[in-house]
Amino acid sequence: MTSARINEKNTAFFLVIALLLIFIMAARTPLDTDLWWHLRAGEETIRSGSPVTVDNFSFSRFNEPWTNHSWLSQVILYEIYGMTGFAGLSLFVSISAVLCMGIVSLQMPGKPIIKMFLLVLGGIVASVNWVPRPQILSLVLLALTGFILYQYQKKPDRWIWILPVIFMIWGNLHGGYALGLLLAGCVLAGSILALLSGANSSLDWREILRLAVVIVIGYLTTAISPNGLKTLLIPFQTVNVTGLQNLISEWASPDFHEPLQLVFLVYFILFIWLLAFARKPVRLEYLFSISVFAFLAFTARRNFGPFVIVSLPVMAEFSQHLEIPPKVSNSIQKWNPGRSGKTIPNGLRKVINCLIIVLLASACIIKTVYVTQPDLVDHYLRQNYPLDAVEWVSRHVSPSRVMNEYNWGGFITWQLRDFPVFIDGRTDLFGDEIINEWQDVMQCGSRTKQILNKWDVHLLMVENSRPVIDCAVNDGWQVVYQDDQAAVLTDEISRVK
C-alpha cells in the first residue's frame, strides 16, 4: 500500500474520531432560555400558515412589528420537538455541531493527528454556542461560507455565486448572516490591501470585483423573506441595545475564571504562538478575519464559535510551518516505531481502528439517550425554570400580565399561554427602554411603582431573592406562592382562584 493511500486512510480515521468526540461534547440536555419562545413562534407559524411578524407574546410590545428573522428555524425546531421531543432536539444540536466542524475540517491542511487535536480543542471552545436555537444553524452556514471563500482563494471560479443563495436562506434562518458578510468582507479588504501594498494576494482585481459584487448581492438577497427590507437592518438592531452585556451572559465579555472560558484563552494563546513560531508570513486576508473575529470573541462570548470557525484553518496551515528545535525533532524520530520496524500489522490496525470507532459511536448513542431521559430533563427543568410556580399559577391565578424574570420569559410564554410576559429573550424587539424598566423594577428602583402602574401589572413572578419582593410587600402586594426558587406576588387577592 502506498504512503499516500495510508495517509488518506489515517486522515479519514482521525477525522471520524474527532467528529465523534465533537458529537459526544454536543450531546446534552437541550434546554435554553430562548428555546421556549422559538418553539411557541414555530407553533404559531404552523398553526396560522404564515410567520409571526407581530408580537403577541408580551404586553410591553403587544401588536408591534417584530422582525422575526429566525422564523424558518423556529418551524424546524418545533417540528423536531413535536415529532421526537427532547431527544430530537439533542440530536439536532449534535449533528449541527458535527456538520459545522466537518466543513471546517475541509479547509484544514496538515498531519491528521494535529488536525484531530485542533478540531477537538476548537470544539471545546465553540461548545458554548451549541444550544437548541437558530444560532447553531448560523455556525453551520458560517463554516460553509468560509469553505466557499477558501475554495475561491485557491482557485477562483463560478462557485462563489452560490453565496447569494446561501445568504437568502440564512436571512430566513437567523440574523447571524451578518457574520458571513463580515467574513467575506475581511477576505475582500485583505485582498485589496495586499494588492495595493505589493504583498502576496490570492486574488487579482477582477476576482476582487467579482467577490465585491457577490457580497452586495448576498446582502440584498437576505431581504427575500417575510420580513422584507427589515431583514437588512437586523445586524444593527441588536448591536444598538446597550443593556445586553449587563443582562445576558452570552453578550458579556469572557470571564476567564470560568474553566470553559479559560479554554478559549488557552486556545487564543496557542494560536498566537503558532503564528509567532511558524516559518511563514501571515497573509493579509487571514490577518483581517482573525483580528475582526477575535475582537468579537473578546467582546461577547457568544462569538467563541465564529472565532473558532475562522481561526482553525489558519492554525492548521501554520502548524505545518513550525520551527521545531533539532533536539526535539531528533527525540521524536527516536521514538518513531517505524524506524525500528515495530509497526502494527495492517490487519490488527484495522481491527483496533474499527473497535475505537464502534466504542465512540456507542458512547454517542448512550450519551444522547442518557441526557434526554425524562427524569433528567425534568430535573434540569426544575433546576433552571420555575416549573412548580408555573403549575401553581396555572391552577390558582386568573390570566394576567406577568412582570417576570428575563430568563423565564420564554418558558412562561410556552407554558402559560394566557399570561403575557413583560420581557423575554427578543432583545431586538424590546430594546433599551423595556430592558431598563425591567432592571429598575427587579432592583426596586425609584420608578418601580410607576412602571407597574404604567403597564397595569398585578402579577409578579420573580426569583425569591429579588429586592422587588420586599418593595412590593411594603406597597401592599402579597406573596401568594413561594419556593426555593421563585416567588409569586399579586396586589389583588381576587385574582387568586
Image (cartoon, helix red, strand yellow):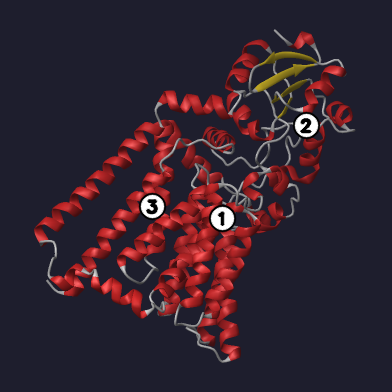
Q: Is residue 94 above or below residue 453?
A: below
Q: Quadrant of residue 463?
A: top right
Q: Earlier in the sequence, mark 1 or mark 2?
A: 1
- Position of 285 with respect to 493 (left or right) is left
Depth-wise, is mark 1 or mark 3 nearer the camera? 3
394 vs 263, nearest the viewer: 263
Which type of secondary structure does the marked residue at label 3 adopt?
Answer: helix
Look at label 3 and name its amino acid. Answer: Val
Which type of secondary structure does the marked residue at label 1 adopt?
Answer: helix
Q: Are marks 2 and 3 in contact (CB under 8 Å)?
A: no
| Residue at the image position 49 percent from the left and 65 percent from the top | 270
Look at label 2 and name its amino acid. Answer: Met
Locate the N terminus by quadrant: bottom left
In percent of width and height, residue 164 lies at 51, 65
Few, some or many residues within 10 Å of mark 1 (<14, 14–19, 20+)? many
Q: Earlier in the sequence, mark 2 or mark 3?
A: 3
Label for residue 171? 1
| Residue at the image position 82 percent from the left and 35 percent from the top | 440
Label for residue 186? none
* Spatial CA span between label 1 and label 3: 22 Å
Depth-wise, is mark 1 or mark 2 nearer the camera? 2
Q: Earlier in the sequence, mark 1 or mark 3?
A: 3
* Spatial CA span between label 1 and label 2: 35 Å
Look at label 1 and name its amino acid. Answer: Gly
Label for residue 442? 2
Label for residue 98? 3
Q: Quadrant of residue 462?
A: top right
